[in-house]
Image (cartoon, coloured by chain):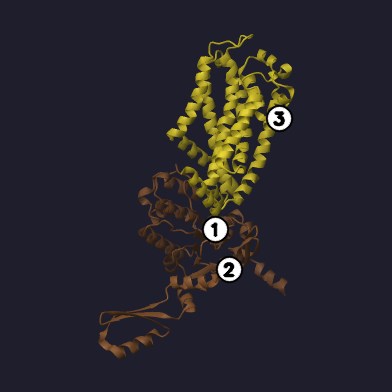
Chain colours: A brown, B yellow
């Protein structure tokens, strides 16, 4: 039976339903086990945020998926291919956003993007041509800097260029390791718009790591939390917070005095509150657990 | 066109772009010009001196060795520096993230360093036309020999540089190691004085490496045939020279890509981040 099932699954590896499949992924550096049985699946077009404390193995996971590291054990497939054995055709369907610092310093923005985009030419398929360089430069907000030398760009501008390089081949799957580290609020918002456009218009599957929980909530369809070498939570931000805590915080003031109350039934509590005090109630605020509360609770629970 | 050929062509344009960048970069250009200028000045002071016991001017005697030495000094050291630096700054990792990117990268680097070494050689030869009597009259056959040996020398030096640059851990280490190797080889390879003055085992050792043969080839092209009497066996040994240089070139060209790929396979964003950290600490 197993053999038959395997055969059926292996008939057309390019057409598997999932964009990314990870199962029982282990990674050890010497005696240190970083990943201990990571498993998750990402559907085509989905945007996933991978969260977790420093050293939890987020970067290791993403580098295994990119084919830059070979896992100790476990099964990994990206676009139906085992990354460590991915050929150049497979490579052409991926986008990798690297954290650069001084490479290609003497190149000009447009010159480098144009050069790098040409590597994708032999692999272009109808309907998924590489980006027009001018449009791409505008899309990442480097229009004014298109003809500047790269070593003259600010840190944030360089990071935008990194993103542009990552998507220049119009990838089907895009990996971003802390894409907005060092962005100012405006650059961050621009990047979020770009990510939305990629996933909405181009059906790009996006896997990003971040420490910015607000960003994860805004961008991701689904959030994975990696802690202690395992995926300890998997779901939308909303679902995760409901799983961790049904409590909502109710704040109000009465007669100039502030009150806070945590309750599972916020609506009932507020109804009761008004029934008792009527118009004396002011500054009413009901707040569900934020992703940050949820994240802290999950990670603390895991580390305990 | 196959994707590999396509990437190789991109590598050529990459090499050309980076060569132009190096020309428009004052410190870089200044460094190369200053290095060549020193050698030209040496040539200038040697122009009237005669090599004792021969009719040869000192300048014509030292020009071939200078040209031979410029190949590893410019080509090999340049390649070592590029690889060591670009492994650290993420250029190599970017190449790896592209389809056929390593091919483009390697071809680009070979192109760029060939061009800059060849231009330095041309500058040196132009200076030689002024200070070395009879250089203009050596005839097309000798010029062709000079060009072929220079090219063979480059082909033997550049892959070697790529290998050293990718295997040695730190950029400083790689540079220092290659400098010591070149210095040592220069001392035993008969570049500035006849190799026959050395002990037999040192002569034997020098025969293994390309620098001795490159120097011999350059002398065979630039010196009068009577000067061959000072060489081992009284001959220029053109066949042996070609074969040894060719063997080094083939060995380097065959082994460099897999070594580079292996090194590149070990590269990852997090490793680079760690090295970036180290480099920052070195700077402060």
Closer-to-camera residue (B136/B179): B179
Residue named by callout 1: A93
Circle on res. B135? none
Residue named by callout 2: A230
Label 2 secondary element: strand
* Dot 2 or dot 1, earlier in sequence: 1
Nearer the viewer's eye, disc 2 or disc 1? 2
Query: Splitting the image into 4 quarters, where does residue B217 fall?
Result: top right
In the orientation shown, which residue stands out farthest toward the front?
A257
How would you rate the neighbour count of disc 1 (Cα within 10 Å): few for under 14, some for 14-19, many for 20 or more? Answer: many
Label 3 secondary element: helix
Residue A287 rendering spot, x and y as whole percentages: 38, 77
Label 1 secondary element: loop
Kindly identify the residue that appears in the image at 39 percent across and 84 percent down: A266
Kindly identify the residue that appears in the image at 53 percent across and 36 percent down: B112
How many labels were placed on the picture?
3
Q: CB under 8 Å between callouts 3 and 2? A: no
Residue named by callout 3: B208
Chain of the residue under the numbered disc 2 shown in the image: A
For the residues labelled 3 and 2, the Cα–Cα distance comes to 55 Å
- In this rendering, the answer to whether B140 lies above or below A252 is above
Q: Image check: B200 left or right of B42?
A: right
Chain of the residue under the numbered disc 3 shown in the image: B
């Amino acid at each position: 039976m197993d053999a038959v099932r395997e055969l059926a699954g292996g008939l057309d590896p390019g057409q598997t339903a999932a964009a990314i499949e990870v199962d029982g992924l282990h990674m050890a550096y010497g005696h240190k086990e970083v990943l201990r049985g990571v498993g998750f699946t990402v559907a085509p077009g989905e945007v996933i945020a991978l969260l977790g404390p420093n050293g939890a193995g987020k970067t290791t996971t993403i580098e295994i998926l990119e084919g830059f590291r070979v896992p100790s054990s476990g099964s990994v497939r990206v676009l139906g291919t085992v990354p460590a054995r991915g050929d150049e055709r497979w490579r052409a369907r991926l986008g990798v956003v690297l954290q650069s610092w001084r490479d290609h310093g003497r190149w000009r923005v447009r010159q480098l993007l144009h050069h790098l985009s040409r590597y994708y030419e032999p692999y272009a398929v109808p309907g998924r041509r590489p980006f027009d360089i001018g449009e791409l430069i505008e899309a990442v907000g480097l229009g004014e800097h298109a003809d500047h030398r790269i070593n003259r760009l600010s840190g944030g501008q360089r990071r935008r260029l990194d993103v542009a390089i990552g998507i220049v081949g119009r990838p089907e799957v895009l990996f971003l390791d802390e894409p907005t580290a060092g962005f100012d609020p405006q650059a961050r918002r621009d990047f979020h718009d770009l990510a939305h456009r990629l996933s909405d218009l181009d059906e790009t599957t996006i896997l990003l790591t971040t420490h910015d929980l607000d960003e994860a909530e805004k961008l991701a369809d689904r959030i994975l939390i990696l802690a202690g070498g395992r995926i300890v939570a998997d779901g939308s931000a909303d679902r995760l917070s409901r799983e961790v805590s049904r409590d909502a915080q109710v704040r109000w003031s009465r007669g100039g005095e502030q009150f806070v109350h945590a309750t599972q039934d916020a609506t009932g509590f507020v109804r009761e509150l008004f029934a008792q005090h009527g118009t004396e109630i002011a500054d009413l605020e009901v707040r569900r657990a934020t992703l940050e509360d949820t994240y802290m609770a999950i990670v603390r629970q895991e580390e305990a | 066109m196959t994707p590999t050929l396509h990437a190789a062509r991109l590598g050529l344009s990459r090499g050309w772009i980076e060569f132009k960048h190096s020309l428009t970069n004052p410190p870089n250009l200044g460094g190369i010009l200053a290095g060549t200028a020193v050698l030209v000045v040496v040539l200038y002071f040697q122009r009237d001196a005669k090599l004792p016991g021969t009719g040869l001017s000192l300048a014509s005697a030292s020009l071939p060795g200078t040209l031979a030495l410029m190949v590893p000094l410019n080509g090999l050291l340049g390649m070592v520096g590029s690889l060591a630096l670009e492994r650290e700054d993420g250029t190599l990792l970017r190449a790896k993230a592209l389809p056929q990117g390593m091919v483009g990268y390697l071809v680009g680097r070979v192109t760029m360093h060939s061009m800059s070494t060849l231009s330095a050689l041309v500058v040196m030869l132009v200076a030689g036309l002024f200070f070395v009597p009879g250089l203009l009259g050596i005839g097309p056959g000798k010029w062709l020999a000079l060009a072929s040996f220079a090219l063979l020398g480059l082909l033997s030096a550049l892959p070697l540089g790529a290998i050293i640059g990718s295997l040695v851990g730190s950029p400083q280490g790689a540079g220092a190691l290659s400098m010591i190797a070149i210095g040592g080889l220069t001392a035993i390879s008969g570049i500035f004085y006849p190799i026959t003055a050395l002990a037999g085992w040192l002569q034997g050792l020098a025969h293994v490496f390309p620098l001795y043969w490159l120097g011999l080839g350059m002398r065979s092209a630039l010196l009068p045939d009577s000067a061959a009497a000072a060489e081992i066996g009284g001959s220029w040994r053109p066949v042996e020279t070609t074969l040894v240089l060719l063997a080094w070139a083939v060995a380097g060209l065959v082994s460099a890509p897999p070594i580079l790929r292996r090194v590149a396979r070990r590269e990852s964003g997090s490793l680079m981040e760690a090295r970036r950290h180290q480099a920052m600490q070195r700077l402060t």
